[in-house]
């Protein structure tokens, strides 16, 4: 009887210690302070897909939503750091690893604005499927007045690529080729600037887009490069990398993924330029915090 009571006491204490350890560990990473004077970029670990959260003060943006089965992961991640509203949701292109959880995000959070390319240029079944599913979800939410989400074109009223502010951070769509036959090269390419700091988001854009951007004399320089197409060999030419000249490279990819991302050739290029590499398969969730000049990195592992 005494042994039974001692065992129960031991198990109870062990459970308390496990609970405390879990919460202390979680707080060390998840309890991020959203200060007015800083910009936060969260590379959420969604395996072989992509989702980036931007926070500046009380303003938020989500770039892509990952695969359909990562919707719960993203919603929980946002909830854990106190986010229940997305001011701007940007879908770079309608491949499932970038738009798969869009419906879950719309149904779970207060999403005020959504930006994506003109659907008249969709050419594949996959694009049309994910777009239709997403559009029906938005329409139903708006009809039932559960939430109201406004759809914005990538172009403004002057037919120029859209630019606006997320708090004090300036978001600019700097390249978009909606009529490209390659869906990856239809990606919305954007730059986010905060004082003297900037990050370039390439979506899944490949070598052809990189060349077009350089030929068009578009300013691609940035402190951080979100590497195109998960680090595939189809993106990140050395010439483009030198033009961006980043301090950090962000790669969202799954552990031991079947595509071999990031490709060894891309890693060698990054290393040759002495660029610090951050990867979700190795580092888990990654948070970049900048005051507009200095950069702080938090890694889950």
Image (cartoon, rainbow, N blue to C red):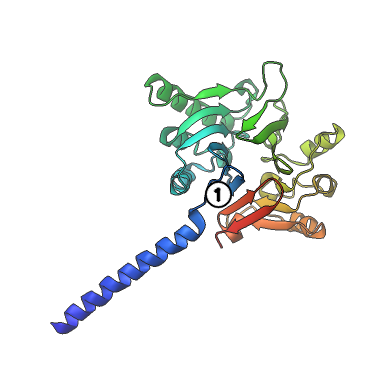
Q: Residue at x 79, y 59 (%)?
A: 274
Q: Residue at x 57, y 37 (%)?
A: 61
Count of numbered tags: 1
Query: Is residue 261 at all visible to an observer of this figure?
Result: no
Q: Farthest residue to the left: give it.
A: 1
* Local secondary structure at mark 1: loop
Residue 224 or residue 143, whichever sits in front:
224
Query: Is residue 251 at all visible to an observer of this figure?
Result: yes
Q: Position of residue 254 (x, y in %)?
A: 58, 54
271 to the left or right of 297: right
Q: Position of residue 41 (x, y in %)?
A: 61, 46
Q: Residue at x 53, y 38 (%)?
A: 58
Quadrant containing the N terminus is: bottom left
Residue 245 or residue 136, whichever sits in front:
245
Q: Quadrant of residue 2?
A: bottom left
Q: Which residue is mark 1?
A: 44
232 to the left or right of 237: left
Q: Farthest residue to the top: give it.
A: 157
Residue 277 or residue 257, whichever sits in front:
277
Would you place residue 229 above or below residue 271 in this image? above
Q: Position of residue 122 (x, y in %)?
A: 62, 26
Quadrant containing the C terminus is: bottom right
Residue 186 or residue 221, whichever sits in front:
221
Would you place residue 160 above or below residue 35 in this image? above
Q: Farthest residue to the front: give it.
A: 37
237 to the left or right of 296: right
Would you place residue 15 above or below residue 87 in this image? below
Q: Position of residue 202 (x, y in %)?
A: 70, 40
Would you place residue 284 above or below residue 128 in this image? below
Dot 1 alpha-carbon crowd within 10 angstroms: few under 14, some 14 to 19, many 20 or more: many
């Amino acid at each position: 009887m005494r042994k039974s009571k001692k065992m129960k006491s031991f198990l109870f204490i062990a459970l308390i210690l496990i609970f405390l350890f879990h919460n202390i560990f979680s707080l060390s990473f998840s309890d991020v302070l959203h200060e007015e004077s800083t910009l936060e970029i969260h590379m959420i670990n969604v395996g072989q897909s992509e989702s980036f959260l931007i926070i500046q003060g009380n303003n938020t943006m989500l770039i892509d939503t990952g695969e359909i089965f990562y919707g719960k992961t993203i919603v929980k991640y946002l909830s854990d750091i106190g986010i229940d509203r997305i001011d701007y949701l940007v879908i770079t292109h309608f491949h499932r690893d970038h738009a798969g959880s869009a419906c879950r995000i719309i149904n779970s959070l207060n999403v005020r604005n959504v930006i994506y390319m003109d659907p008249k240029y969709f050419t594949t079944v996959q694009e049309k499927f994910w777009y239709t599913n997403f559009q029906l979800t938005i329409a139903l939410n708006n009809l039932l007045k559960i939430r109201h989400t406004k759809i914005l074109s990538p172009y403004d009223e002057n037919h120029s690529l859209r630019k606006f502010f997320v708090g004090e951070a300036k978001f600019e769509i700097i390249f978009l080729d909606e009529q490209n036959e390659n869906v990856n090269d239809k990606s919305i390419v954007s730059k986010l600037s905060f004082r003297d700091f900037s990050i370039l988001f390439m979506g899944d854009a490949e070598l052809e887009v990189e060349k077009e951007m350089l030929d068009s004399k578009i300013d691609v320089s940035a402190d951080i490069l979100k590497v195109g197409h998960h680090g595939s060999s189809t993106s990140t030419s050395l010439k483009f990398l030198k033009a961006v000249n980043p301090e950090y490279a962000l790669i969202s990819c799954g552990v031991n993924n079947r595509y071999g991302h990031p490709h060894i050739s891309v890693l060698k290029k990054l290393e040759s330029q002495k660029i610090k590499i951050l990867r979700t398969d190795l580092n888990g969730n990654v948070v970049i915090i900048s005051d507009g000049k200095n950069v702080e990195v938090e890694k889950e592992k």
